Amino acid sequence: MSSNAKIVLRKKSNREGLYPLAIRITKNRRSTYQYLGHYIELEDWDEKNIRVKKSNSNYKNLNSLLSLKLSEVNKALITLQSEKKDASANQIKKVIYSSANKSTFFELAEEHLDELESSEKLNRLSTDKAWVSFIVKFNKSKQLSFQEIDERFLKKLMLNLKTKHSLSETSIMNILVLIRLLFNRAIKQKIVNRELYPFGTDKIRIKFPETTKVGLNINEIRRIESLNNLSPIELHTRNVWLYSFNFAGMRVSDILRTKWSDFYDGRLHYRMHKNSKLLSLKIPEKVLKILDQYKDDKRSEDDFVFPELKKANLDNAKDVYNKRKTATKKFNNNLKSISKKAKINKKITMHIARHSFGNIAGDSIHPLMLQKLYRHSDLKTTLNYQANFIHKEADDALDSVINF
């Protein structure tokens, strides 16, 4: 399928309420955008004729620039086509702009966010969009070249994030990871020289702090299971939480997507939303009792087990994401009242179901089996995760010294 380019006004305003002009490059119905570094009022854009209106004082120069840039891109597209080079929209863009060296940090950030949105990675999109906004606030402008992002810039940014915004060390490291990702992309596109790379052993190091993972113990889970004074919404929340725990800490996004058709031959068969891995697990007796409570609402085998996504537009990833996000927030709020009724002092969230499984598993299950149950891609991830819950050897070592 042939590729094409078009001048567009992106409907994402900056802090001043102005909208960016860009060239949209499309191939096989997938698009990427090259921002031109100019912003105008929404009312100044002629959508029909694809040009800046006379109401903008600089319309002549802007329209001349748009024509020139579009012509350059179209010439490059014709050259690629004549050379029979098949490439994606992003690859075409890299070829066209590889020698331009004009893209700014925030232009590549917008490109990154657009790609996340196009691939429907909405959870990552929401997080990275927030990280970008912190960098914009620090820089006080969207004009930032990669050459300006040196060690001094990053150290000042880290201090600003800690003192002015009170971000945790983990959040600050995540922002640096995003900057590093975009810097590497800029190097590949020859926007900046590798010699200016500000990360490394003797430069800015990205090191995440150790985190404490706290899970419930068997006695605490039994207290939750035995509660008989729950409201209907608390009862539903408990069911979802216990469903997660009994399936080795199944994630909320997978729980809410569970359909009746996923259960057959005494097993749950599902594909993980996070990494598309297929998994098959035996249905525990406790889960069968939970499922019995929802059978009266079953409309067909393709119906969702739990109600949160039943009214979602499944063709609209944003609608599904928003309903899942809202449901998770409600679950976590309900778990606060459930923990009080169960007289548990630990913080309980949906994700704590996963930690609780790990806590009870301890070192009694082989790491390779835990890797399968956790659906981790790398055994090292499982070992690092489970290290939070293995204490027996350290406790025995301590006792061997002090018990005299």
Image (cartoon, rainbow, N blue to C red):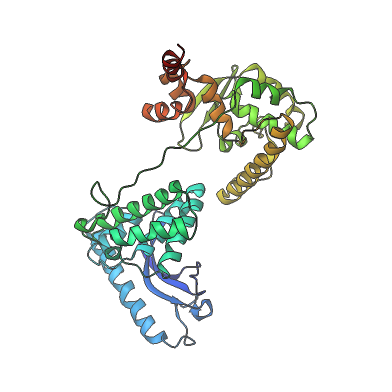
Q: Is residue 289 visible?
A: yes
Quadrant location, the N terminus: bottom left
Please tell me which residue lies in front, 383 or 301. 383
* Residue 260 in sight from this viewpoint: no
Up the image or down, 129 lies above or below 317; here it is: below
Answer with the quarter of the image where residue 92 lies: bottom left
- Residue displayed at 30% across by 56% down: 183
Can you give x and y, in whole percent of width and height, for residue 105 in the image?
35, 63
Q: Quadrant of the C terminus?
A: top left
Q: Residue at x 36, y 61 (%)?
A: 156
92 relative to 44 in the view: left or right: left
- Report whether 196 appears left or right of 272: left
154 to 381, vertically: above or below: below
217 sits to left or right of 298: left
Residue sticking out furthest to the top: 404
Picture coordinates of residue 25, whole percent (x, y): 37, 62
Front-lying residue, 260 or 28: 260
Q: Is residue 217 above or below residue 349?
A: above
**Which residue extends farthest front?**
404
Q: Residue at x 40, y 48 (%)?
A: 173
**Image location of residue 280, percent across then percent down:** 52, 22
Q: Nearer the viewer, residue 388 or 320?
A: 388
